[in-house]
Amino acid sequence: MQQHALASRIGRVGVWHGGLGRLPASTARQAAAEIEQLGYGALWFGEGSATKEAFTHAGLLLAATERITVATGIANIWGRDAASANGAALTLAEAHDGRFLLGLGASHAPLVQLRGHAYAKPLAAMRDYLDALDSAPYEGPLPDPAPARVLAALGPKMLELARDRAAGAHPYFVPVEHTARAREVLGAGPLLAPEQAVLLETDPAKARALAREHHTRFYLELPNYVGNLRRFGFGDDDFAGGGSDRLVDALVAWGDVDTVRRRVQEHLDAGADHVALQPLAADRGLGLDQLRELAPAVLTG
């Protein structure tokens, strides 16, 4: 699928939801159907070391919806070989009218080691995986168009690979400044679809505490994210205690609806084609109430 057609299909704003992988299938199906009804253009979900397997999960969400694009954000390349990923992606795209988007990532050393693999040279590993994906045989019916793929890319070299070997990039846990830099590396054509955590809470202390508990504290334990944030002027003091106020505010758009709308627009102005909103909620809640409230503001324009 050409990048401009992909951007048009998924629209300016979608939803990223890591919590769906921990829910009963019936609850996940209901949530996906409501997110589609609200008008969001894509539903992204993560693949953790102990959550639902990415392609099985995608099939569940695709079967529960009719129009929305369902995207792995991301499928871990250490989780299955390239031939299996290729067959799964083609199967899902053919069965569901091209609504499947394949997001691939090299993940992080601690998470890869949990799977029993040695995490070394992630860029080379991704390049080899893409080579194997492109050469994998497949005898089932082919979808038309073939499923697009995007890469979880933070640094310049992975962004270059996303530019040259994929339809674009899906950065996660990044400030708006990363979006601007990613667009410079990608150039004008490829899709740029960053994730953006959001929280409808106007009390600063409550908002930052919840953001640390349910978002930043975990991801600041992963070296790839910390290394990327250092590129944008954050330092050791910002990474302590679940993140400084400055860091939390850069990574989580908290406040009222208009605050979130402005952050989405900042990403779009910086070069994003699509922004995937991740609602944060206490007790690992779904945050559907926030998505309902945000939809009229962020889906227009």
Image: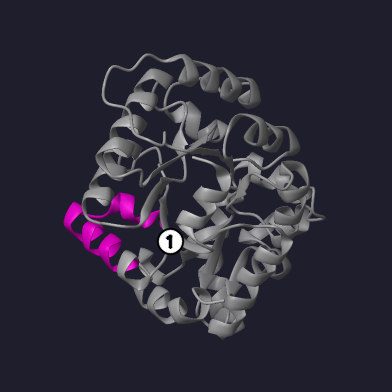
Percent across and percent down for residue 170 are 57, 47
**Lateral position of residue 266 relative to residue 72, left or right:** right
| Residue at 33% in and 38% down | 93
**Lateral position of residue 269 relative to residue 115, left or right:** right
Q: Which sits in the foreground, 39 or 235?
A: 39
How many numbered discs? 1
Residue 217 figure quarter: bottom right
Residue occupied by mark 1: 41
Residue sticking out furthest to the left: 26
| Residue at 72% in and 39% down | 155
Percent across and percent down for residue 190 are 64, 44
Residue 236 seen:
yes
Indicate the colouring scheme. one colour
What residue span does the magenta drawing correspond to? 16-35
Which kind of residue does numbered mark 1 sit on?
Gly
Question: Looking at the image, is 244 positioned above or below residue 187?
Answer: below
Characterize the magenta stretch by its predominant secondary structure: helix
Is residue 32 inside the magenta stretch? yes
| Residue at 73% in and 68% down | 246
Q: Pick the quarter of the image with the C terminus.
A: bottom right
Q: Which sits in the foreground, 196 or 204?
A: 196
Q: Which sits in the foreground, 50 or 17?
A: 17
Residue 256 seen:
no
Q: Which sits in the foreground, 174 or 193?
A: 193
Percent across and percent down for residue 174 are 65, 55
Percent across and percent down for residue 3 are 57, 45
Is residue 211 inside the magenta stretch? no
Query: Dot 1 lies on which element?
Result: loop
